[in-house]
Image (cartoon, rainbow, N blue to C red):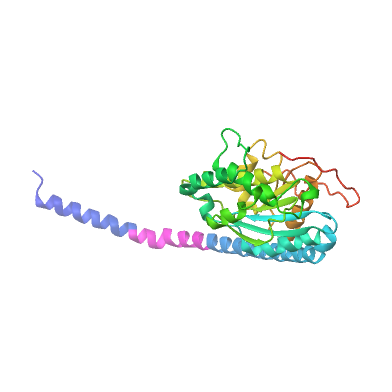
Amino acid sequence: MIDFRYHLVSIVAIFLALTVGIVLGSTVLEPTFFKSAEEMTASLRQANEKYLTQISELRTREEGGDSLVTSHLPDLVRGQLAGERVVLVEAPGASAALRDPVEKLVTSAGAAYTGRISLTEKFIDGEQASVVDGLAANLAPAGVTFPDGASPYDKAATMLAGAIVTNDRAQAGRANPAAAGVLEAFQAGDFLTLNGNPEQRATMAIVLAPAQPYEGEDADRQTNALVSVAAGLDSGALGTVLAGTVTASANGGVIGALHDTGGVASAVSTVDTVDFAAGRIVVVYALREQLAGRSGAYGVGSGATAFEPTVTTPSQTPTPAASRG
């Protein structure tokens, strides 16, 4: 049998081993470990300072470039949209800070800014989809039918487009008798708010995307609702541009969702740099390109094919498409 003396020797051996390990760790391994950690920390600190300096330099360069473009913006867009009328449609969650720059942009390009429609959160609320559907159906003029399979937002977009845009310049600046009461009805239902005179129909539209992609289980349906709005406006106008930041062209963003569609992507132009002066100029150039019946995906996001379209001079007046769709 194992006696007490054996247990005592075992315990003493264990403590002796621990003592030896502590001594070795503190006298042999510890200096090496701390030296390696200090060297790694110093290296990381140096790299971090280098990257911070680079970021600061890039930000300063970007701000300088943006300031330069902003100061010359009127010259860069002058006459590009002469004779056109432009309406702005804001998605729920769009940046309010971009409103004034967009208005100044289109007027600098020679277009008349008719006003703004701001869609509310209620407009894209899933629980309100049936209400939107019924409202659009009730507002449709006699004899007007919607395509089979049209979503509530396809129908709403058709009605809103009839009230605020036209592809007939002879009708531009006039209210549409067939759409009388449409804007008032959607406003009364708290689905949108109005600014300016958007009922005095425009020939072109800019749709401002949300600042951030929608989240939650209903996000895809909300995003697709805005794609429907852009498509509807484009069908009734001489051209439409969906504009936003690079987040809108990322996965889950409205621009990204539009790029995934076939027919809409080939008709509606997109710009994902509207938060920069250069990007806002691209919005004008994209609208100008729309007058020739062409579209494109512009910016720096994954779905963009170029930063800007080919620019035509005001003297090279493109022939507008008779109808867009």
Question: Which residue shows up at 79% across the image and 51% down it?
Answer: 285
Identity of the residue furthest to the right in this view: 315
Of residues 289 and 10, the one drawn nearer to the viewer in this rendering = 289
Name the image quarter holding the C terminus.
top right
- Where's residue 117, x and y in %? 63, 57
What is the magenta range? 22-38
Question: Which residue shows up at 65% across the image and 44% down it?
Answer: 232
Q: Does the magenta stretch include residue 116?
A: no
Answer yes or no: is residue 256 visible: no
Answer yes or no: is residue 305 visible: yes
Answer with left or right where residue 212 lies relative to residue 116: left
Report the magenta stretch's main SS.
Answer: helix
In the image, is residue 104 above or below residue 5? below
Identity of the residue furthest to the top in this view: 148
Answer with left or right where residue 266 lies relative to residue 254: right
- Where's residue 131, x and y in %? 49, 47
In the image, is residue 43 above or below residue 124? below
Q: Is residue 27 magenta?
A: yes
User: In the rendered image, which quarter is residue 43 located in?
Assistant: bottom right
- Where's residue 247, x and y in %? 61, 52
Of residues 153 and 92, the one drawn nearer to the viewer in this rendering = 153
Name the image quarter holding the N terminus.
top left
Answer with left or right where residue 20 lies relative to residue 178: left
- Where's residue 121, x and y in %? 52, 55
